[in-house]
């Protein structure tokens, strides 16, 4: 069940992107809220985790840390994001 999947990801996940395939919206919401990753997908490929796909332009690098700034920082340096992506089976070549 979803609890086993969540436990597995908590133990072995990358913190980068994780996904679930389900038709049950309650299961999807439970998964989205329980998983600590930058991008969490429902019914879509994790291959969409890309600066270009998100409209950010070319990627310089990818961070899986929650706080990546060093030295003096403002509010932007203290901000983290979690993207929740819903799909209907999309894949990316």
Image (spheres, rainbow, N blue to C red):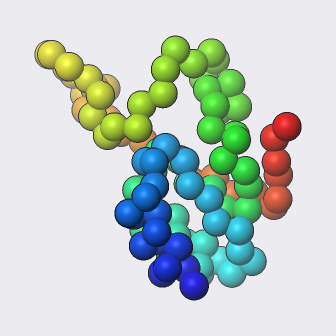
The residue lying furthest to the bottom in this view is 1
Q: Quadrant of residue 56?
A: top right
**Left/right of residue 85 with respect to residue 62 in the rendered view:** right
The residue lying furthest to the front in this view is 12
* Front residue (pair 12, 41): 12
**Can you say whether 62 is above or below 88 in the image?**
above
Residue at 81% in and 61% down: 88
Q: Position of residue 11 (x, y in %)?
A: 38, 63
**Can you say whether 26 is above or below 10 in the image?**
below
Q: Position of residue 45 (x, y in %)?
A: 73, 50
Q: Is residue 11 visible?
A: yes
**Can you say whether 42 is above or below 22 in the image?**
above
Q: Quadrant of residue 53?
A: top right
Q: Is residue 33 visible?
A: no
* Front residue (pair 78, 37): 37
Q: Position of residue 31 (x, y in %)?
A: 52, 70
Residue at 85% in and 37% down: 93
**Can you say whether 59 is above or below 68 in the image?**
above
**Left/right of residue 56 with respect to residue 33 in the rendered view:** right
Residue at 81% in and 41% down: 92
Q: Quadrant of the N terminus?
A: bottom right
Q: Quadrant of residue 74?
A: top left
Q: Position of residue 19 (x, y in %)?
A: 62, 59
Residue at 52% in and 64% down: 32
């Amino acid at each position: 069940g979803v609890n086993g999947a969540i436990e597995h990801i908590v133990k072995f996940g990358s913190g980068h992107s994780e996904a679930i395939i389900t038709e049950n919206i309650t299961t999807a919401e439970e998964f989205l809220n329980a998983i600590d990753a930058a991008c969490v997908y429902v019914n879509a490929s994790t291959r969409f985790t890309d600066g270009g796909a998100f409209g950010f332009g070319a990627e310089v690098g990818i961070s899986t840390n929650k706080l990546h700034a060093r030295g003096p920082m403002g509010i932007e340096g203290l901000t983290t994001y979690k993207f929740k992506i819903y799909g209907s089976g999309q894949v990316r070549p």
